[in-house]
């Protein structure tokens, strides 16, 4: 029985990494890079409610992170793997979208209900790894602005996945 549980846990972990790898590949496609560019530009402009294209782009990016949050809550991916693959994007995007998320959640508390707990857990893991509890390097205003400016100028050439070979 214990051996069966061990095999099941190892299989779930492998499937979780496979799912994260597929999301990582999607994140670097030309279409998704265009979405990220539009989302970052939208956030740099203060996420104006009347900009429907920018809103749609940001929703696309946040929805990917929401999916990862769901996978984590269902214990299909571990927080260490989420941090490894996505922390450098998830943390600044969510930090930059704080006001946007509050606006969206004012109308629907169910929206991004997987994303916000995931953000907190990934940020806590970041604090644990960096020691001394520092987060300004990734979610401080200057770091977020710099991140958004880089994302807004993304090349549309596809990049290789970060999946280990």
Image (cartoon, rainbow, N blue to C red):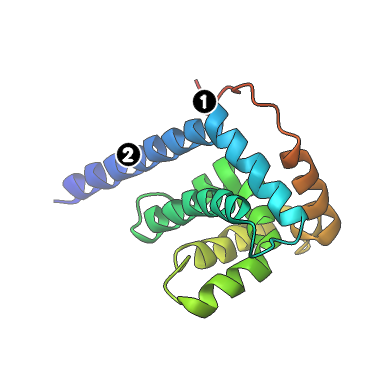
Q: Looking at the picture, tell me which residue is in the foreground, 68 or 154.
A: 154
Most extreme residue toward the right, as rendered? Answer: 142
Q: Looking at the picture, tell me which residue is in the foreground, 63 or 130.
A: 63
Residue 157 vertical placement versus 22 (above, below): above
Q: Do tag 2 and tag 1 residues touch (Cβ < 8 Å)?
A: no
Tell me residue 85's x, y (percent). 55, 40
Position of 129 with respect to 17 (left or right) is right
Residue 1 vertical placement versus 127 (above, below): above
Most extreme residue toward the front, as rendered? Answer: 50
Query: Which residue occupies 58% across, 41% down?
Result: 35
Which residue is identified by label 1? 164
Tell me residue 102's x, y (percent). 60, 74
Residue 45 in view (yes/no): yes
Q: Quadrant of residue 111?
A: bottom left
Query: Which residue occupies 17% across, 45% down?
Result: 4
Tell me residue 122's x, y (percent). 58, 58
- How many C-alpha atoms fall within 10 Å of the one at disc 1: few (<14), some, or many (≥20)? few
Residue 9 vertical placement versus 46 (above, below): above
Which label is found at residue 15? 2
Q: Looking at the picture, tell me which residue is in the foreground, 37 or 98.
A: 37
Q: Looking at the picture, tell me which residue is in the foreground, 58 or 150.
A: 58
């Amino acid at each position: 029985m214990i051996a069966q549980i061990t095999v099941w846990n190892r299989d779930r972990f492998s499937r979780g990494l496979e799912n994260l790898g597929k999301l990582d590949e999607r994140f670097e496609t030309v279409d998704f890079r265009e979405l990220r560019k539009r989302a970052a530009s939208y956030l740099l402009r203060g996420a104006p409610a009347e900009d429907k294209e920018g809103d749609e782009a940001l929703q696309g990016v946040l929805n990917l992170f929401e999916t990862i949050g769901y996978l984590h809550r269902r214990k299909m991916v571990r927080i260490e793997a989420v941090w490894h693959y996505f922390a450098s994007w998830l943390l600044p995007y969510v930090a930059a979208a704080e006001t946007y998320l509050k606006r969206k959640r004012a109308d629907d508390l169910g929206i991004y209900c997987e994303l916000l707990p995931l953000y907190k857990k990934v940020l806590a893991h970041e604090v644990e790894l960096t020691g001394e509890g520092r987060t300004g390097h990734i979610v401080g205003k200057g770091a977020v602005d710099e991140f958004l400016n880089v994302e807004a100028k993304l090349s549309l050439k596809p990049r290789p996945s970060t999946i280990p070979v």
